[in-house]
Amino acid sequence: MRNKIEQLLSEIEHLAAKNKEEVEAIRVQLLGKKGSITMLFEDFKQVTAEEKRELGQKLNQLKVRAGEYINRLREQIEAQSETVTSLDTSMPGQPRPLGTRHPLSIVRNEIIDIFKHLGYTVAEGPEVEDDYHVFGALNFPPEHPARDMQDTFFVTTGDNPIILRTHTSSVQVRAMESQKPPIRIICPGRVFRNEAISARAHCIFHQIEGLYIDENVSFADMKQSILYFAREMFGADVQTRLRPSYFPFTEPSGEVDVSCNICKGKGCNVCKHTGWLEIMGCGMVDPNVLEASGIDSKKYTGFAFGMGIERIAMLKWQVKDLRHYFENDVRFLNQFKTAM
Ligand code: DAH
């Protein structure tokens, strides 16, 4: 019996199992009802009293060792199976939902691309500006209603208060201050106005400003550039019309309409049955504005224009509620997957 115990003790050291079933088989083989260790306990009943002490100790030791060993095998196999699942290269991958470009970014990029072909480069300026760059240098008289608390978000008060820019025309001023003509820039950016949020208005929206200053820049150049833009943006058969308007920083000033791309000029809800849609303001840069930024208005002339990106996006996709552009509901955004 002593030999049998010794033999089993050394045997269990070499036991190995590939899976849980094999571990269970080993357990049954050693410690099950008919297992070799269980059988030894049966034999133990027959040994003499003198041997009982020594053999009993050894037998218990064997039982404990076998139990420990089986547990260790079981743990090893469990650990292995965990690593195997996390490393299984044959498992299909977890799909990651692909984002889309925001519709306003799509339109902004499209507008930039069109003007790039006419030689414009992108310029940017701060969203938090001073009154001088947003109004003063653009020929807004001190009492002009656009400076009113109703429209402008003020950050500070005083002579030249810090405000949130209400239009991207402020970037014109920054460009004229820092560059010599010829200047040909397009300035996309976020603007802020103290408006109640509704389907047609928001306190944050986006504009693109354009500015071209050089010798002999004429009103005809402006018309032609805008026509080129309108055709690229809305299709070759689009009609444009220029209405006289007023902006403090341009003289003469105009507003540009394009023929309604939905009803083709026949009249519908979107164009309010006029057949025309307004897309931008424009004009020849007022000499006062050139001079305020140190540009010789005898030598140089220029034109400027400004449009709302939301407005162009609305016309492109007929999204009638502006708020969709700001809510970032993926059900809305995913509809622009193919427009990138
Ligand atoms: N800044 C004007 C606005 O926010 C848009 C505008 C009109 C820009 C005429 C211009 C311009 O450059 O010439 O309503």
Image (cartoon, rainbow, N blue to C red):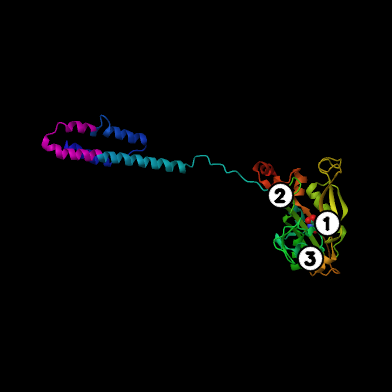
The verdict on residue 122 being magenta is no
Which residue is drawn at the image coordinates 16% and 38% (left, top)?
Answer: 55
Image mark for residue 282:
1
The reply to whether residue 191 is visible in this rendering is: yes
The reply to whether residue 305 is visible in this rendering is: no
Q: Position of residue 215 (x, y in %)?
A: 84, 66
Contact flag, marks 1 and 3 (Cβ < 8 Å):
no
Contact flag, marks 1 and 2 (Cβ < 8 Å):
no
Relative vertical location of residue 325 with respect to residue 29 in this rendering, above or below: below
* Residue underneath mark 3: 137
Mark in the foreground, 1 or 3: 3
Task: Tell me where residue 119 sits by quadrant.
Answer: bottom right
Q: Looking at mark 1, is its residue's CB closer than 8 Å to ligand 1?
A: yes
Task: Tell me where residue 142 sits by quadrant.
Answer: bottom right
Which residue extends farthest top?
34
Quarter of the picture holding the N terminus: top left
Q: Position of residue 311 (x, y in %)?
A: 77, 49
- Residue type at the position of mark 3: Ala
Give the total of numbered labels: 3
User: What residue span does the magenta drawing correspond to?
Assistant: 38-63
Looking at the rendering, the quadrant in which ligand 1 lies is bottom right
* Residue underneath mark 2: 104
Q: Position of residue 304 (x, y in %)?
A: 81, 59
Measure the alpha-carbon separation of dots 3 and 2.
29 Å
- Residue type at the position of mark 2: Leu
**Upstream in sequence: badge 1 or badge 2:** 2
What kind of element bears circle 3?
Answer: helix
Predominant secondary structure, magenta span: helix
Contact flag, marks 3 and 2 (Cβ < 8 Å):
no
Relative vertical location of residue 17 with respect to residue 214 in this rendering, above or below: above
